Image (cartoon, grey):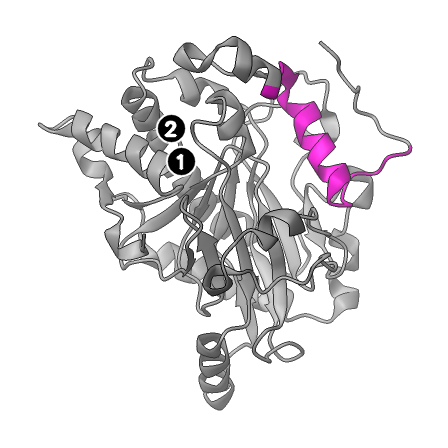
Amino acid sequence: MKLDDIPQIDLQVFLDKEDGYLEQCEAVRDCLCDYGILFVKDPRVSNEHNVAFLDLMEKYFDQEEEAKENDIKQDLHYQVGATPSKIELARDHCSKVEKLDEDNRAVTICPPEADIKWRFFWRIGDLPEETEFPSLNADPVIPEGFDDWEDTMNTWGEKMIGCVEEVAKMAALGFGLEENTFYDYLQKAPHLLAPTGSDLKLYHNEGDIFASFHYDLNFLTIHGKSRFPGLYVWLRDGTRCPVKVPDGCLLLQAGKQFEWLTGGKVLAGFHEVVVSDATVKAYEKAKENGNVLWRVSSTLFGHTASDKILEPIGDFANEENAKNYPPTKAGKQVMDELNAIKLGSRGDRDDKASKL
């Protein structure tokens, strides 16, 4: 398998319900099942908004660390605001890495060390009126000194989540479900515009690891273009591929919540972010041109609502899948994952550990 084999999904066909839109829905299904990722052309998404977003986040991450300290919300499990470097620690997937053949082996150290990237989480969409998981649905943090912050972040974030929602509808139809089956799970959910910031002034040697080998805990992750390469994904057959998002496209990869709802028919995809030879070349060119030397990802995490129950649905609901994916509130699933990657505070927590 290789990325060039993956068809590009034309969202316009689905939005207009043109002839062949159901075939596009089936292509979404096949990409998720066969490859684990998909490329989507969304006519509503402009690269200009991605450029404005990247410009803003480069300025933010390039500040002195003291300027970002007030944006760090450890008491909210870092689920809004800034997460400093060397906080998040990926799960230990070394046993899986060892099974990959040498050509597709992760660069990630085993066991992994804490990621050297920064991150900023910005809440997108409506919040629930009531929830058992208030810290996962907290109001967004607005940094000081950026007059265009809310408009820039909301503009790009709403376009990204809009694409996620339409792909969720297409996936549902592709799997023979009602169109709004997955879409309904996404309403009033803690969606997060989630740019990472990696300081190339400090880390620009080939093999430096910004984000260790991991899967995402949410429903669907969507990426726009970054200005620096370094993202690698694993396809369903174990092939490791450097990602280059085609012009006019967005990249989507399934997370753990999608896996849960489909009983493992769609698996959460693995990826890592490292300094490659291409990253070094891009860094040297950016340095020569006097550009900001932070690698910023254009990433959004589309979530299911915290109080929704995750369990295999439709034809995915059977006794075997129920054992592997027992009914669990999405908020509890997220908290379990956050604790596993050292972002959850295990002590004084305002969330209820709901048990069904």
Q: Are marks 1 and 2 in contact (CB under 8 Å)?
A: yes
Residue 325 makes an appearance in the image? no
Q: Percent from the top left, x then y, of residue 195?
A: 56, 54
**SS class of the residue under badge 2?**
helix
**Which residue is painted at 69% across and 41% down in the image?**
79
Residue 312 falls left or right of residue 235: right
Residue 167 makes an appearance in the image? yes
Range of residues picked out in magenta: 324-347
The correct choice, above or below, for 183 with respect to 157 in the image is above
User: Nearest the camera: 219 or 241?
Assistant: 241
The correct choice, above or below, for 322 with respect to 114 in the image is above
Q: Percent from the top left, x then y, of residue 97?
A: 59, 53
**Tag shown at residue 104:** none
User: Nearest the camera: 170 or 227?
Assistant: 170
Instruction: Return the residue found at the far right.
Output: 347
Q: Is residue 344 magenta?
A: yes
**Which residue is painted at 56% across and 51% down in the image?**
99
Task: Pick the quarter of the image with the C terminus.
Answer: top right
Q: Which residue is mark 1?
A: 164
The correct choice, above or below, for 288 with respect to 21 in the image is below
User: Nearest the camera: 151 or 305?
Assistant: 305
Residue 250 falls left or right of residue 115: left
Q: Which residue is mark 2?
A: 168
**SS class of the residue under badge 1?**
helix
